[in-house]
Image (cartoon, rainbow, N blue to C red):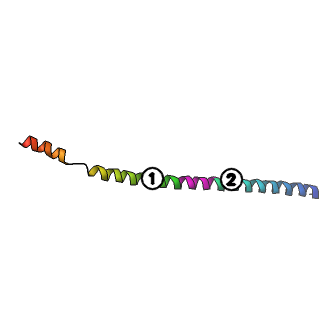
Amino acid sequence: MTSSQHAKINSRFEYIAAEISLLRQEIDRDLDKAVKTVDALAAAEVELNKARAGFNFAMSWKNPWPKRRENAAKLG
């Protein structure tokens, strides 16, 4: 193998290594975005569950008196 062939091969390997490095960086950025998205979705789910629990608690305290008056009217 001549030195010019060796240099071409080295140049090609360096190019491939640079491409791999860029792809790894892109993958890392995409993974970071995905993790942030999952974290945001988890936080939104927590807030939704809090709101749902608050709504259910508020609905459990509805005014029972109209129903009692209705039942009393039926009785007598």
In this view, the mark in front (1 or 2)? 1
Q: Amino acid at mark 1?
A: Glu
**Residue 72 on image: x %, y %:** 10, 44
Q: Out of 21 and 45, give the one closest to the viewer.
A: 45
Q: Secondary structure at mark 1?
A: helix
Q: Is residue 71 visible?
A: yes
Q: Residue furthest top?
A: 74
Which label's residue is closer to the chain start, 1 or 2?
2
Q: Residue at x 17, y 44 (%)?
A: 67
**Residue 65 on image: x %, y %:** 18, 47
**Residue 46 on image: x %, y %:** 44, 55
Q: Describe residue 7's horizontal placement relative to residue 69 as left or right.
A: right
Q: Out of 65 and 50, give the one closest to the viewer.
A: 65
Task: Provide the residue designation for mark 1.
Answer: 45
**Residue 4 on image: x %, y %:** 93, 55
Quadrant of the image containing the N terminus: bottom right
| Disc sitting over residue 21 in the figure | none
Quadrant of the image containing the C terminus: top left
Q: Is residue 70 magenta?
A: no
Vertical comparison of 75 with 18: above or below: above
Q: CA distance from mark 1 to mark 2?
A: 29 Å
| Disc sitting over residue 26 in the figure | 2
Q: Secondary structure at mark 2?
A: helix
What is the magenta range? 30-38
Q: Describe residue 1's horizontal placement relative to residue 45 as left or right.
A: right
| SS assignment for the magenta stretch, majority | helix
Q: Residue furthest left?
A: 76
Sort mark 2 into few (<14), some (14-19) or many (20+) by Cα contacts within 10 Å: few
Q: Amino acid at mark 2?
A: Glu
Q: Residue at x 31, y 53 (%)?
A: 57
Q: Residue at x 23, y 48 (%)?
A: 63
Q: Is residue 36 magenta?
A: yes
